[in-house]
Image (cartoon, rainbow, N blue to C red):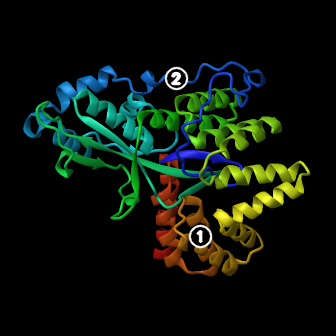
Amino acid sequence: MRRRSVLWGAAALAGCASPEWRVGPGASIFHDELFGASDEAMAASEIFALSPAMRAWIDDDVSGAFRRRGPHYGLIEALREPSGLKMTYDATLTRNAAQAFEARAGNCLSLVIMTAVLARALGLRIDYQQVDNGGVWDRSASLVYSLGHVNLRIGKQIPVARWSDSDGDWITIDFLESEVADGVRSWSIGESRIVSMFMNNRAVESLVAGRSDAAYAWSRASIEADPRHVDAYNTLGVIYLRHGNKAAAEAAWRFALKLPVPQPLALGNLADLMESTGRTAEALGMRAELQRIQPVTPLKDYDDGLKALALGDAQRARRAFEREVKRGIHFHELHLNLARAYLMLGVLSRVQEHLELARKYSTTHEQQALYSAKLARLKQVQAQ
């Protein structure tokens, strides 16, 4: 998945801006003077570079599959079969194509980028898609994230004399099949949006790691890569605010709200800022509008559940956490805390169920190992 940062909630799904939407190098939302230099941000060409190891894999390791089935189905086979690349999901870092290939791991965005580079090297057509996953959340300290999802379609090589876009010409590749179901809405996005998403992810990761200069550099690069990518403006505002630059944060969020589509998460961040700076009437107006477009505050029940757990009220905590689950909200800490509530209630079967779900929704190898260890310990206790 890709990550979008916020302070109170998370950034909304990106919408298309009007034709007049432009951000140039001199736009007032950028404040280079507030940050030190950073050389972390990479060019799009580096994100999509075909490494020598990737070229060798194409030429040597899987050339037989390509000869048997053609590059279109051969690449699918190499990605999906147990004897192929054996990629694993890991959201520790948003990797570029070469890094994901070397690690044999990545989040959905990294794996999509890597696959696109391999497909392009084989002369295949690619179509990036953003998927409406219904809202998936995660949190780290005071940051809460909305986790979006992307996949891609790979199209056959089409002879010049014939052009077809039939279903048989395209195969969707999704590295999180649980995100894809019949009727789930998805839409094509351009490569500039993928580049902007990559850079926005890196901005959030840098911010979490305490590298504000790098976070700003990535965030600015994300906006410049795709000025219509609203999530990037929200991230920029969060970076400014955590750096102590409230006026700059306000300008970035107000800029995002100029879009002709609802932006609940930038609006929520801005409402919090208005309240913290004594502009209560304006904050109330923003919260009224926010209530209209987003009736349920993201993760409010989760926070209420944590408070109940701290007070030792396991039944109340369980009810609050399960309200989030009923809304389709899933992340590893939510299920971990449901397991804790059931442990306090003495219902070990439900403890096991939610530890398994916590492992399923974990985003790093370290988290998966932690939950596997907890499950092993629980089974040992049950056996005794």
For the question of whether residue 384 can be seen, the reply is no
Residue 24: image quadrant is: top right
Point out residue 367 in the picture as x, y percentages from the top left corner. Answer: 52, 51
Depth order, front residue of 44/1 = 44
Residue 110: image quadrant is: top left
> Mark 1 or 2 closer to N-term?
2
When the figure is inspected, residue 120 is found, relative to residue 296, above or below; the finding is above
Looking at the picture, which amino acid does disc 1 mark?
A: Glu
Q: What residue do we see at 78% from left, 73% from top?
A: 311
Instruction: Tell me the crowding category of disc 2: few under 14, some 14 to 19, or many 20 or more residues within 10 angstroms, Cα based.
Output: few
Point out residue 238 in the picture as x, y percentages from the top left corner. Answer: 71, 41
The answer for how far apart the CA atoms under marks 1 and 2 are is: 38 Å
The dot on residue 354 is none
Looking at the picture, which amino acid does disc 2 mark?
A: Met
The dot on residue 324 is 1
When the figure is inspected, residue 329 is found, relative to residue 43, above or below; the finding is below
Q: Report which residue position mark 2 lands on.
A: 42
Point out residue 320 in the picture as x, y percentages from the top left corner. Answer: 65, 74
Looking at the rendered structure, the secondary structure element under dot 1 is helix
Q: What residue do we see at 51% from left, 68% from top?
A: 328
Q: Is residue 295 left or right of residue 88?
A: right
Depth order, front residue of 337/111 = 111
Q: What residue do we see at 30% from left, 24% from top?
A: 53
When the figure is inspected, residue 353 is found, relative to residue 70, above or below; the finding is below
Depth order, front residue of 244/128 = 128
